Amino acid sequence: MTAYDVIRLICMTGQLKVSCSGRNIIFEASSEPVLDLSPYSDISAHKRLYNNEINMVKFTGNLSDFCKYLSETLVRVEGETPDLNFICLIDRPIRFNLYQRNVNFTEVLDSVCRAKNLSYYIEPFGVVIVDGSVGKQKNNE
């Protein structure tokens, strides 16, 4: 586990706002967790999710299997093993059916999150799906 991972988990569990100023990491109380380490973030993850289109999404199963499905789909779309993971941080079982055509990864994530009261946030290393009450959905295009 990296220092970045530890800070992210502290932010999520402690309802803190975390920001970065130079070499200082600043923790502040917040009504919802906000992680802003922008000098260390990578906008390319957002662009990849928005620009990569999937011809057809056909899925039936639980959320952790869905994360694996999205990772495998990204490999097919990009043609190589991606360095962007889909991570599920939800303990409760969530099952659903999904069928969509000609959508990008952001649209797929948005529709699942709306339907199941979930949120996701995008970090340089991956897309993290959380309960709706824990995180706030971020869509940076």
Image (cartoon, grey):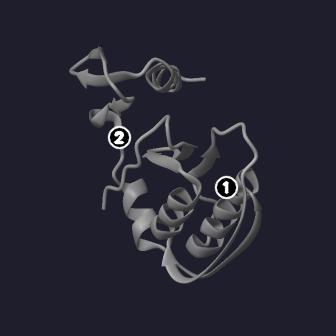
In this orientation, which residue lies closer to the viewer: 77 or 18?
18
Judge the density around disc 1: few (<14), some (14-19), many (≥20) Cα neighbours within 10 Å.
some
Residue farthest along the left direction in this orientation: 22
Name which residue type carries label 1.
Answer: Cys
Q: Cβ–Cβ below 8 Å for labels 2 and 1?
A: no
Residue at 56% in and 71% down: 78
Residue at 41% in and 72% down: 51
Q: Which residue is mark 1?
A: 67
Q: Nearer the viewer, mark 2 or mark 1?
A: 1
- Rounded to the nearest angstrom, the CA distance separating label 2 from label 1 is 22 Å
Judge the density around disc 2: few (<14), some (14-19), many (≥20) Cα neighbours within 10 Å.
few
> SS at mark 2?
loop
**Where does the image place residue 44, in percent across and percent down from the top left?**
37, 56
**Where does the image place residue 27, in percent across and percent down from the top left?**
32, 15
Q: How many marks?
A: 2
Q: Which residue is mark 2?
A: 41
